[in-house]
Structures are given as structure tokens and as C-alpha cells.
Image (cartoon, helix red, strand yellow):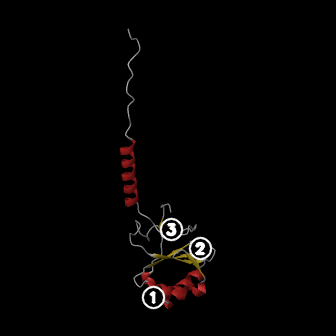
Amino acid sequence: MDLRRPRRPVPAIPIVSLIDILVILLIFFIATTTFRRSKLHLKIALPESNAVGAASPVSEQRTAITVTKDKEILLDGSLIEAERLEQALKDLKTARPQARLELEADSDAALGVLVKVWDALRAAGYSLSDVPARIQRAGEAG
């Protein structure tokens, strides 16, 4: 008389099909991820307004001219001297004639620096009405 329990077969987990599913998910996530251009992370406090400013972010990509409260000017994330801004804007207009610009100025930025930026824009052939200032609506978190 045999009193031992019969051996149960060990259930097999099909690892190969799990790896296939993992690869398919990986390809899906890579294909559907939107990659943004890395911007230099600056702490600028955009001015707030209750009446002016877009209610939602605009979908079109614009090249940013950033003015910090430390009187630094950045063109598309690259630090540039105020004296060289006009030539850099001319070069940008030559290289990318369809490029649209926007001005991001800290609320504590010096007015003199903004005037230099506006002068450089005019000298480079840009209309100031075509270069909107980014303004944060009051109550929005930036």
C-alpha cells in the first residue's frame, strides 16, 4: 500500500509571453510619450493680471526671450549679453524666418533691460506687437 501523496505538477508561468507583453508596452509608452525640449530651469515670477493673459497655454511653439530679475537675458535658453542680442535675433531670423518669439520677463526685472530687449527686437526687424509678453493670470500656479 502506497501512502505517499501523488506529486502535483508545478504550474509553469510562461515567462516568454510576459516578456513579449512587456516589450509591447515599452514600445507603446515610447511611441506615445511627448518629448519636450529641455529648457533651462529658471525661477522667474511672471507678472499676474486679472484681465490680461491667455486663459490656457497656447499650443504653438515660440522661442522665448527670458529676462531675469538679475538683469540676465536668455534667448531660447542660452545666456546672451544685451549688446549681442540684436545680432543674435538677426541670426535667428535668417536661420529660422518662421520662428515666433515671446517675452518672458520676471515681475522684478529692470525696465531698462526690457527697453534694451525691445530696441534689439526692432533693430532685428521684429514688430513688438508680434512678440507677446507671457503673463500669468492671477490665481494660476506657474
Circles 2, 3 touching at the beta carbon (< 8 Å): no
Kind of residue at disc 2:
Thr
Q: Give the Cα distance between marks 1 and 2.
A: 26 Å
Circles 1, 2 touching at the beta carbon (< 8 Å): no
Quarter occupied by the N terminus: top left
Locate residue 48 relative to residue 11 in the image: left or right: right
> Which comes before the other along the chain, label 2 or label 3?
3
Q: Which residue is at a point 50% across and 85% down the rendered structure image?
A: 89
Residue 131 image offset from top left, x and y in percent: 45, 80
Residue 87 image offset from top left, x and y in percent: 54, 89
The residue beneath circle 3 is 38
Q: Nearer the viewer, mark 1 or mark 2?
A: 1
Kind of residue at disc 3:
Ser
Q: Secondary structure at mark 2?
A: loop
Q: Give the Cα distance between marks 3 and 1.
A: 23 Å
| Numbered label attached to residue 4 | none
Q: Give the Cα distance between marks 2 and 3.
A: 18 Å
Locate residue 105 relative to residue 125 in the image: left or right: right
Residue 135 visible to the viewer: yes
Residue 137 image offset from top left, x and y in percent: 46, 66
Q: Secondary structure at mark 3?
A: loop
126 shown above or below 48: below
Residue 126 visible to the viewer: no
Circles 3, 1 touching at the beta carbon (< 8 Å): no
Q: Which residue is at a point 61% across and 73% down the rendered structure image?
A: 69
- Residue at the outermost top position: 1
> Which comes before the other along the chain, label 1 or label 2?
2
Kind of residue at disc 1:
Thr
The residue beneath circle 2 is 68
